Amino acid sequence: VGEEIYDKVLDVASGMQSCSESLGHQEFVLTYKAFEPIGPACLPG
């Protein structure tokens, strides 16, 4: 399974359309969580 995923990533990176692109989807969203900044105060002394 891992090799199939790797091959698909290489194909898409080389210009082949992904499944969603071939269906006409154009939106792209990266979701993320916002975290509080961590500063030196939290590190052990």
Image (cartoon, grey):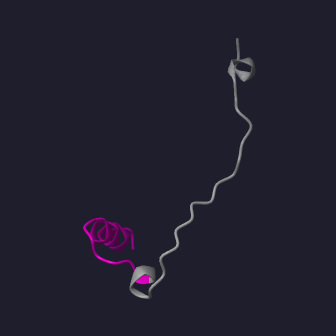
Of 2 and 40, which appears nearest the observer? Answer: 40
Question: Does 38 sit left or right of 20 as displayed?
Answer: right
Q: Does the magenta stretch include residue 5?
A: yes
- Residue 32, given in percent of the width and then of the height, sits at 64, 54
Q: Quadrant of the C terminus?
A: top right
Question: Does 44 sit left or right of 7 as displayed?
Answer: right
At 38% from the left and 70% from the top, the residue drawn is 5
- Residue 16, given in percent of the width and then of the height, sits at 28, 76
Does residue 4 sit above or below 33 in this rendering? below
Q: Does the magenta stretch include residue 27?
A: no
At 34% from the left and 67% from the top, the residue drawn is 9
Res. 15 image quadrant? bottom left
Residue that extends furthest to the top in the rendered view of this protein:
45
At 74% from the left and 23% from the top, the residue drawn is 42
At 29% from the left and 70% from the top, the residue drawn is 7
Q: Quadrant of the N terminus?
A: bottom left
Q: What stretch is highlighted in magenta?
A: 1-19
Question: Does 13 sit left or right of 27 as displayed?
Answer: left
Question: Does 11 sit left or right of 24 as displayed?
Answer: left
Res. 29 image quadrant? bottom right
Per the picture, the main secondary structure of the magenta-coloured stretch is helix
Does residue 21 sit above or below 34 in this rendering? below
